[in-house]
Image: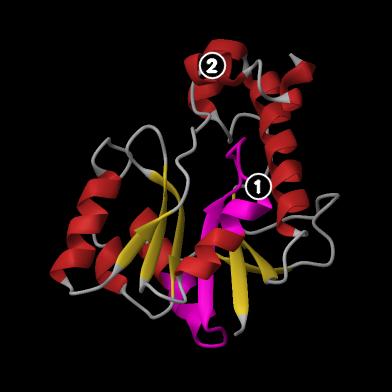
Amino acid sequence: MKKLLIIFLKYPQLGRVKTRLAKGIGEEKALAIYQHLVAHTLEVAALGDWDVQLHWAQPMASYPGFEGYDYSLQKGDDLGSRMAGSMAKGLRHYDRVVLIGSDIPGIHEDIIEDAFEQLSRYDIVFGPAADGGYYLVGLSQYLPEVFQLREWSHPEVLAQSIELAKANGSTWALVDTLSDLDTEEDLKKLHKLQKLFNIL
């Protein structure tokens, strides 16, 4: 089975990443944390027996550490349409596609491997985020309906996505729940667990 891991990224630029976190700790520290999280994500992505693609939120400029990857530009008017577009593209050439963000401190290869394994039995897999969204989504067939939420970034994103899957008659599974890192409060909760934050 051909497996593809897609990583959604923003270009690491001062003032353009982790903007909610930056309100509490400043733009320079927020950028440094994002850079560390991206590096961590790429390290984890390199550990599995899957292909990796980077899908950028904006046109990519040259940046150290991103050489050698296949990459694409995200296309769509909102997060849902961008994810659906990336999934459609991936499923043209792969049997199973898993998509993750680039800023989840707890992500590790066992979770990604579990997601691919779940796709041998289910149509869709989600990685629940502690805030009610999801940090991972995987498909074994194209299901654009799952990404057709009216709004994103609210506590019912995962629940509503599961309801869309059910309404479509699709089967679904979950992997481990992880925490996002979007605010200074999130950082305080994770600080003891993550060596990534030694820069603070």
Say if residue 150 shows up in the picture: no
Q: Is residue 139 above or below residue 78?
A: below
Instruction: Judge whether 154 appears above or below 61 on screen.
Output: above
Q: Is residue 194 above or below residue 79?
A: above
Q: Which residue is mark 1?
A: 108
Q: Which residue is mark 2?
A: 189
Horizontal side of residue 24 vs 170, given as left or right: right
Q: Residue at x 72, y 51 (%)?
A: 44
Residue 39 shows in the view: yes
Mark 1, secondary structure of its residue:
loop
User: Which percent across, then down, holds residue 22?
Assistant: 57, 20
150 relative to 30 in the view: left or right: left
Q: Dividing the image into 4 quarters, which one contains the N terminus?
A: bottom right
Marks counted in the figure total 2
Using the image as rendered, state which of residue 64 and residue 200 is in the foreground.
200
Q: Quadrant of residue 94?
A: bottom right
Neighbor class of circle 1 (other Cα within 10 Å; few <14, some 14-19, many 20+) is: some
The magenta region covers 85-112
Q: Is residue 48 magenta?
A: no
Label 1 – label 2 distance at C-alpha: 19 Å
- Between 183 and 104, the one lying in front of the other is 104
For marks 1 and 2, the one nearer the N-term is: 1
77 sits to left or right of 103: left
Q: What label does residue 69 carry, if any? A: none
